[in-house]
Image (cartoon, helix red, strand yellow):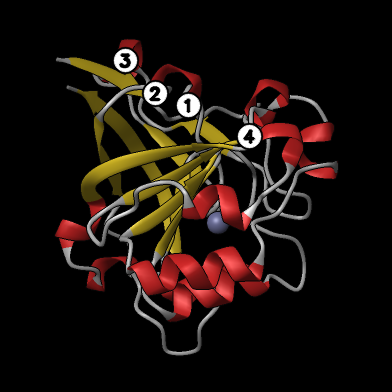
Amino acid sequence: MKWIDLSVVINEKTPVYPGDPKTKIEPAGILEKDGYEDHYVSIGTHAGTHIDAPRHMVKNGRSLDQISVDKFIGKGVLIKISDKKFDLDAIKSTNIEQVDIVLFYTGISEVYHQSEYYDNYPAITKEIAEYLVNKKVKMVGVDMCSVDHEPFPVHRILLRNEILIIENLTNLQELENEEFKIYAFPIKLEIDGAPARVLAEIH
Ligand SMILES: [Zn+2]
């Protein structure tokens, strides 16, 4: 058994979606002075690797604390996206089951610290989102800053149907041709989303 960490590091340099608040980390307790170290952290709920709950885009949708924890664990399916093209037929030819957590590997995470990551990312199509809703998957994850562009129709289709979204995944290349299980735990915040530690357990 092998573990792969699919989460990015969070510090003040971690990129954020254009317009989102920047992460701030300030010392509170100082070891030499107070006998302990701790910090104040100010972070957007969609910074770094994170999970979107329905409330992110659905009125009165569930917040993270209201999600049944079994949603956060499931059999993973990796779908490689070539040339930034999301193709429904290619996705239909992949075996996807009701309990699955579907991850799309576009490779754009290789430019995570460059502007291209935010300026030129592909989008999941509405047809693919509807296909995944019919499949009743648990979560959809991407190695991109978002599953789609404004006005975010794919976000709405997935979240309205209680399919959670994981964004800013990394290391997905490690999962190619592997069978694996996903563990994706966001902080139990009573709001729309939160950073998450996302791990793959390779069998
Ligand atoms: Zn998000």
Q: Which residue is drawn at 68% across and 70% down?
A: 152
Q: Which quadrant, please, contains the C terminus?
A: top left
- Under tag 4, what secondary structure? loop
> Mark 2 belongs to which amino acid?
Leu
Which residue in the structure is indicated by mark 4? 106
Q: Are marks 4 and 3 in contact (CB under 8 Å)?
A: no
Q: Earlier in the sequence, mark 3 or mark 2?
A: 3
- Closer to us: 29 or 102: 102
Task: Tell which residue pokes out farthest to the top in this image.
Answer: 32
Q: In the figure, is residue 177 to the left or right of 84?
A: left
Name which residue type carries label 3.
Leu
**Ligand 1 - quadrant of the structure image:** bottom right
The reply to whether callout 2 and callout 1 are in contact (CB within 8 Å) is yes
Residue 138, position as x, y percentages in the image: 30, 60
Of badges 3 and 2, the one in the foreground is 2
- Measured Cα–Cα span from mark 2 to mark 1: 5 Å
Quickly name the residue at label 2: 175
Judging by the rendered image, the residue that carries numbered circle 3 is: 31
Q: Report how far apart the C-alphas of labels 4 and 3 lie in the structure.
A: 43 Å
Task: Check contact, mark 4 vs mark 2: CB within 8 A.
Answer: no
Q: Which amino acid type is shown beneath numbered disc 1?
A: Leu
Within 8 Å: ligand 1 and the Cβ of disc 4? no
Front of the two marks 3 and 1: 1
